[in-house]
């Protein structure tokens, strides 16, 4: 027993030394390497995971406007017995990185349509418009090109910024969108409310949503999550810089413009209520859009239900993906 008490501290020390040496080696190999090889490699593995384990296929759609291209991940084998589910991401990377914890489970119950919103991932446009309506038109235009009917049956699951897009889709195309899931989204906020909430965290709001450096990215993660955030302090700056390069640099100007348009615009004088059956999901520790705003949205939508997740922050899709998947599946399939 006495020998064990001596061995354990020694093992801890050797493991600590080994980890430090490994970190130093990685830094020596990659710190001055400009090409974001690690994140591009990870992104490629994510694509392989989507294709191999989730039966998803990448499809690029050119829209009728002649200016806009929308990239989708779509179920390779669409089954008539399964409902169609559109998944709309928020800020924080492309659709692959945001839905990695969900697609495997959801692909077993739904025909999935997962777009990169315009100027995220591989979607782009020459159109100068930066509104949520433009995003909604682009998604719907792509869905029509992919064979989705305008006569109903679509369920739309959305998180954060994607919630604004989903709400516009439900309002403008009520005959196409049958059910809506809104997770942690500031739908219905006035301009003042949006600015007040985001300015609590200091600095330029667009710098938080579209980070320029590792410090900004760490702040975005800390604001977005309530649990499991310790990992961000262990990731070397050069890896975070590579992530920023891959996710934000190509369309940085456009992403900032999208954020500013969202934050500076006023909602309709009388905030309209959509008629679709709606599930609202909120973490009770959300620091981006606090829970009271989720309750307010629920009160405003007579055909809605509200699910509150305990000790979960804004990033519900990262912090509680299994619970989120179960709620989405039960709601869309009408399983009690």
Image (cartoon, helix red, strand yellow):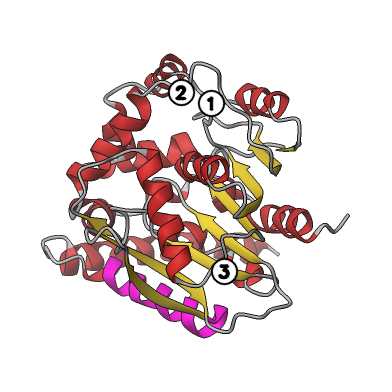
Q: Position of residue 124 (x, y in %)?
A: 25, 58
Is residue 118 visible to the viewer in this orientation of the structure? yes
Residue at 28% from the left image edge and 56% from the top image edge: 247
The dominant secondary structure in magenta is helix
In the rendered structure, are the residues bearing label 1 and label 2 in contact, judged by CB atoms less than 8 Å apart? yes
Foreground residue among 232 and 22: 232
Front label number (3 vs 2): 2
Q: Which corner quadrant of the image does residue 255 belong to?
A: top left
Which residue is labeled 3 in the image? Answer: 112
Which residue is labeled 2 in the image? Answer: 267
Report the span colored magenta. Answer: 39-55
Q: Earlier in the sequence, mark 1 or mark 2?
A: 1
Q: Earlier in the sequence, mark 3 or mark 2?
A: 3
Tag 1, which secondary structure? loop
Q: Image check: 132 left or right of 10?
A: left
Is residue 213 visible to the viewer in this orientation of the structure? no
Tag 2, which secondary structure? loop
Residue at 56% from the left image edge and 22% from the top image edge: 271
The verdict on residue 133 being magenta is no
Which residue is labeled 1 in the image? Answer: 188
Spatial CA distance of label 1 from label 3 is 27 Å
Q: Which corner quadrant of the image does residue 264 belong to?
A: top left
Q: Quadrant of the C terminus?
A: bottom right
- The answer to whether 12 is drawn above or below residue 191 in the figure is below
Tag 3, which secondary structure? strand
């Amino acid at each position: 027993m006495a020998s064990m008490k001596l061995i354990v501290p020694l093992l801890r020390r050797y493991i600590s030394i080994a980890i430090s040496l490994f970190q130093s080696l990685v830094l020596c190999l990659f710190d001055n390497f400009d090409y974001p090889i690690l994140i591009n490699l990870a992104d490629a593995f994510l694509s392989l995971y989507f294709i191999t384990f989730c039966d998803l296929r990448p499809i690029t759609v050119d829209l009728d406007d002649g200016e806009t291209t929308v990239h989708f991940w779509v179920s390779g084998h669409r089954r008539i017995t399964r409902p169609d589910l559109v998944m709309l991401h928020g800020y924080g990377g492309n659709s692959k990185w945001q839905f990695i914890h969900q697609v495997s489970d959801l692909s077993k119950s739904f025909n999935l349509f997962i777009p990169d919103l315009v100027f995220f991932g591989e979607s782009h446009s020459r159109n100068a418009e930066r509104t949520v309506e433009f995003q909604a038109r682009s998604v719907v235009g792509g869905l029509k090109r992919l064979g989705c009917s305008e006569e109903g049956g679509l369920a739309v699951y959305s998180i954060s910024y994607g919630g604004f897009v989903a709400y516009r889709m439900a309002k403008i195309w009520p005959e196409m969108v049958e059910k809506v899931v809104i997770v942690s989204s500031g739908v219905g906020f006035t301009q003042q409310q949006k600015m007040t909430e985001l300015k609590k965290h200091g600095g330029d709001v667009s710098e938080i949503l579209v980070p320029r450096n590792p410090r900004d990215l760490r702040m975005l993660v800390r604001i977005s999550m309530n649990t499991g955030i310790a990992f961000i302090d262990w990731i070397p700056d050069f890896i975070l810089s590579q992530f920023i390069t891959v996710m934000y640099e190509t369309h940085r100007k456009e992403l900032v413009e999208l954020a500013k348009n969202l934050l500076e615009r006023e909602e309709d004088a009388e905030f309209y209520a959509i008629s679709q059956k709606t599930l609202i999901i909120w973490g009770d520790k959300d620091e981006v859009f606090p829970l009271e705003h989720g309750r307010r949205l629920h009160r405003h939508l007579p055909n809605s239900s509200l699910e509150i997740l305990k000790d979960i922050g804004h990033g519900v899709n990262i912090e509680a993906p299994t619970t989120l998947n179960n709620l989405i599946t039960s709601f869309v399939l009408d399983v009690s």
